[in-house]
Amino acid sequence: MFLDEVTIFVKAGNGGDGCMSFLREKFKPKGGPDGGNGGDGGSIIFEGDPQKTTLINFKHRRHFRADDGQPGRGKNMFGRGGEDLIISVPLGTVIRDAQTNEILADITKAGERILMFKGGRRGLGNNHFKSSTNRTPRQFTKGKICEEKRLKLELKLLADVGIIGLPNAGKSTLLSHISHARPKIADYPFTTLEPSLGIVEVGNYQRFVAADIPGLIEGAHNGTGLGDTFLRHIERTKVLIHLIDISDNLDGSDEKKSDAYENLKIINRELKEYSPELAVKPQIVALNKIDATADLKSIEKLKKKIEKKYPVYLISAATGKGLKELLEAVARLLTPSA
């Protein structure tokens, strides 16, 4: 199961109270103050874990609490500090304040640690307040009490390239042919119900990570179909491959089938509605399933129409035709110019 959004509750440990105590022994009836300090509470720390790919671990556990500091004791004994609680999350996790939606952290590196909430400060025992003018202090302080915080975790996959398009455009088939990923493939809409990642190698030296995003349809930004829930996973990408199924009607003359050019506009409208920044990312259009149509004249006409705005490649994700040229074009966009 893929889980990419969850709300959790965290609480740093409370500080231990300071102790008020006076030494009373057989030969020291007035031995003076000996109340020790409490211990600091444990902190809440988030750590990036490259072995995790989903937030599924938070499905059944939503409350996390670090250890409290122990109170001080007589004979100047200090309380033990509470242990920090380290919460492991997948790379690409954005941590927000659930109440204000403010971004508190964005964890993108393996082993990266973010101190989210520091544990409560220890209380001071009365021995701490002893001075030449105050030989028998009776004041002490309590440890700081920490409040429980509500956090929202959002997972945004770390991919270089996002593969987008309408349902059944062939996105999963493309990813399975250009990488070792094995997403579910079937001949019905919305086969892909969760994003998939694959490592793509181009030539002998260059590689990039591609993400297959579940199909979008018109009105996705309003929740139609699967909605735009998964578009967050291509917000970090540098290039988009926009896959269009040209086994559909190319010129829109058959009302029972959609116009391939209109499909392009539909998806780009949804991208813009979701995020203007996403809509202006570099985009390569791949006209897919060229093996399933013999209307070469209409294909060429469509290609010229789209090329006014985007580079276009003719491919067949099923047979592999045109994939080499497509991947080389993607690699060029990902390579910084000298």
Image (cartoon, grey):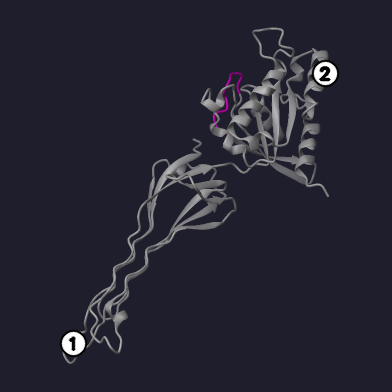
Residue under the point 66% across and 7% down: 255
Task: Give the labeled residue for mark 1.
Answer: 25
Q: Which numbered mark, 2 or 1, is in the foreground of this view? A: 2
Q: Which residue: 77% across, 24% down?
A: 306
Question: What element does badge 1 sit on?
Answer: loop
Tell me if 110 is positioned left or right of 41 in this view. Answer: right
In the rendered image, residue 131, in percent from the top left (x then y), is placed at 30, 86
Q: Tell me the crowding category of disc 2: few under 14, some 14 to 19, or many 20 or more residues within 10 angstroms, Cα based.
A: few
Q: Is residue 159 above or below residue 132?
A: above
Q: Main secondary structure of the magenta part?
A: loop
- The amino acid sitting under disc 2 is Glu
In the displayed structure image, the side of residue 64 where residue 5 appears, left or right: right
> Seen from this angle, which residue lies furthest bottom?
27
Q: Position of residue 129 (x, y in %)?
A: 30, 80
Residue 165 visible from this viewpoint: no
Q: Nearer the viewer, residue 31 or 64?
A: 31
Helix, strand or loop at mark 2 = helix
In space, the residues marked 2 and 1 are separated at their CA atoms by: 100 Å
Of residues 170 and 299, the one nearer the viewer is 299
Q: Position of residue 335 (x, y in %)?
A: 78, 45
Quarter-of-image position of residue 303: top right
Question: 54 and 68: which one is in front?
Answer: 68
**Looking at the image, residue 216 lies above or below residue 63:** above
Q: Is residue 190 magenta?
A: yes
Assess disc 1: are there few (<14), some (14-19) or many (≥20) residues with their C-alpha within 10 Å of its C-alpha: few
Q: Place residue 84 in its image quadrant.
A: bottom left
**Residue kind at label 1, given as amino acid type:** Glu
Residue 300 badge: 2
Residue 56 on the magenta span: no
